[in-house]
Amino acid sequence: MKIKWQLLGVVTLFFFTIQGCTSIPKIQKGTEVKQVYNSKVLLENGQTLKMWKAEESAILKEKSTNTSQKTTIILVRHAEKMKDKKDPDLTFQGLERAERLAQILRPIRLNHVFSTKYRRTQQTATPTALSKELTIEDYNPRALNDFGKMILENYKGQNILVVGHSNTTPELLNFFLKETVVESISESDYGNLYIINIDSNQNAKGVLLRF
């Protein structure tokens, strides 16, 4: 499985192309995403990142298990949480971030929204699930390899959001990319958004943005 990965601000090949640009773009670390579409990502700084070629992007609009299709997996950690409970709710700031995530993902056709059973992950996923008229599906954070394999086998060609935790999100990311690219997420960091594209040959590409 060939892997191309770009953490923003790291000097490596970037898998997206910027419209109107012929050279390899260098995106600064911390670039914030404005909206995610089926075939592109619009950034707050006005740049547009193209995920698929125009002739390929229409495929993502249909639900199918055709192996020729490409799969997009969006990974986020839950938003800001309260500190005084075993299973805490989101703070006001966390609820605002969850709403922002829903706005960012409004243009893209999502087929599934997955979350662990904790309040903080469920509340992060809820605005997006409601806007897409989807039911939040649970997954076991202690069986991430099985969950990842299930996605790869059963949801080819679909767009999927997975809400997790500071330890599970990097583990899933590394599973899909078949390489350790992120070891952990800081306990105080809630703003990472990872987009992974996997083609029919199991070649994976990823990008880290902020929201």
Image (cartoon, rainbow, N blue to C red):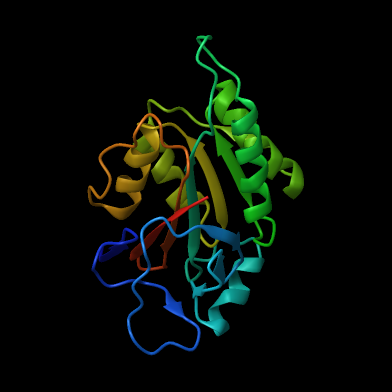
Residue at (64% x, 46% y) in the render: 100
- Location of residue 4 in the rendering, given as x and y in whole percent from the top left corner: 29, 66
The image shows a total of numbered marks equal to 0
Q: Is residue 90 visible?
A: yes
Residue at (40% x, 31% y) in the render: 188
Query: Is residue 54 depicted above or below 131 in this figure?
Result: below
- Location of residue 112 in the rendering, given as x and y in whole percent from the top left corner: 61, 47
- Residue nearest the observer in this picture, 46 or 64: 46
Residue at (50% x, 9% y) in the render: 86
Q: Quadrant of the N terminus?
A: bottom left
Query: Is residue 168 depicted above or below 28 in this figure?
Result: above
Report the side of 164 relative to 119 (left or right). left
- Location of residue 87 in the rendering, given as x and y in whole percent from the top left corner: 54, 14
Report the side of 176 relative to 190 (left or right). left
Location of residue 54 (image quadrant): bottom right
Location of residue 8 (image quadrant): bottom left
- Location of residue 108 in the rendering, given as x and y in whole percent from the top left corner: 64, 61
- Residue nearest the observer in this picture, 90 or 167: 90
Q: Is residue 133 visible?
A: no
Query: Is residue 177 depicted above or below 24 in this figure?
Result: above
Residue at (23% x, 51% y) in the render: 179
Query: Is residue 158 depicted above or below 70 in this figure?
Result: above
